[in-house]
Image (spheres, rainbow, N blue to C red):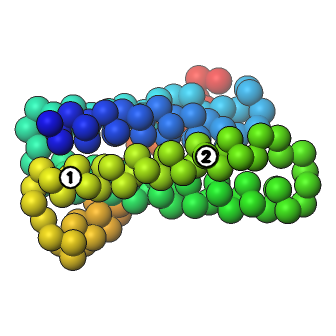
C-alpha cells in the first residue's frame, strides 16, 4: 500500500513540476514544453519503478524529488510573500498559500511512504533524501539542457 501512495504522490509531483517549470517563463512562445515534459516523465518513471520494484535507488530518487520540490516550493512561497508585501496585485492569496501547504504535505507524504517501504531510520532517510536530491538535480539538469537544445533547434 505505501508503494501506491508514494507513486500517486510522485505523479502529482510530476504534474506540478511540469506546470511550475513552464510557469517560470513568461512569454507563451518561449515556454520549454519539451524540457518540462521530460522532467515530468522522469518523475513518472521513478513512480513506475517504485510500484514495480522499489529498489534503494528508486526510493532515494523519490526522496530526492521531494527535497527538490520542497526547495522549489520554498522559492515560490518567498516570491509570493514578496509580491504580497509589495501589493503587486496578488489575488487569492489564502488559496495560493493553501495550495503551497497542500503541496508541502504531499512532499511529507513521499518521505513518510518511502520510509515505510524500506524502514530506514530518520538519519539514514535524511542522508538518502539529500543524496537523491543531488542525483535528481544532476539527471534533471542534463535532461533539461539536452531537451532545451533540441527544442531550440526546431523552433
Q: Residue at x 27, y 70 (%)?
A: 126
In the image, is 20 to the left or to the right of 40?
right
Which residue is tagged 1?
114
Q: How many marks?
A: 2
Q: Quadrant of residue 49?
A: top left
Give the x, y percent position of residue 29: 73, 26
Crowding around mark 1 (Cα neighbors within 10 Å: few <14, some 14 to 19, many 20+) is: many
- Looking at this view, is 4 or 17 the one in front? 4
Give the x, y percent position of residue 108: 36, 55
For residue 30, the mark is: none
Q: Are marks 1 and 2 in contact (CB under 8 Å)?
A: no
Q: Residue at x 61, y 36 (%)?
A: 22
Q: Residue at x 31, y 49 (%)?
A: 110
In the image, is 12 to the left or to the right of 126?
right
- Can residue 149 be seen in this snapshot? no
In the image, is 136 to the left or to the right of 155?
left
Which residue is tagged 2?
98
Give the x, y percent position of residue 96: 67, 44
Amino acid at each position: 500500500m505505501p508503494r501506491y501512495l508514494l507513486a500517486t504522490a510522485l505523479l502529482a509531483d510530476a504534474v506540478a513540476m511540469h506546470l511550475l517549470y513552464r510557469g517560470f517563463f513568461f512569454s507563451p512562445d518561449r515556454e520549454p514544453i519539451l524540457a518540462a515534459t521530460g522532467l515530468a516523465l522522469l518523475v513518472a518513471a521513478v513512480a513506475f519503478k517504485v510500484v514495480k520494484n522499489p529498489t534503494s535507488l528508486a526510493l532515494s530518487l523519490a526522496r530526492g524529488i521531494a527535497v527538490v520540490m520542497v526547495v522549489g516550493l520554498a522559492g515560490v512561497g518567498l516570491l509570493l510573500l514578496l509580491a504580497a508585501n509589495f501589493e503587486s496585485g496578488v489575488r487569492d492569496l489564502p488559496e495560493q498559500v493553501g495550495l503551497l501547504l497542500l503541496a508541502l504535505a504531499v512532499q511529507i507524504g513521499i518521505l513518510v511512504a518511502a520510509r515505510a517501504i524500506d524502514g530506514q531510520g530518520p538519519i539514514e532517510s535524511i542522508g538518502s533524501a539529500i543524496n537523491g536530491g543531488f542525483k535528481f538535480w544532476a539527471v534533471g539538469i542534463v535532461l533539461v539542457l539536452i531537451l532545451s537544445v533540441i527544442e531550440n533547434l526546431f523552433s
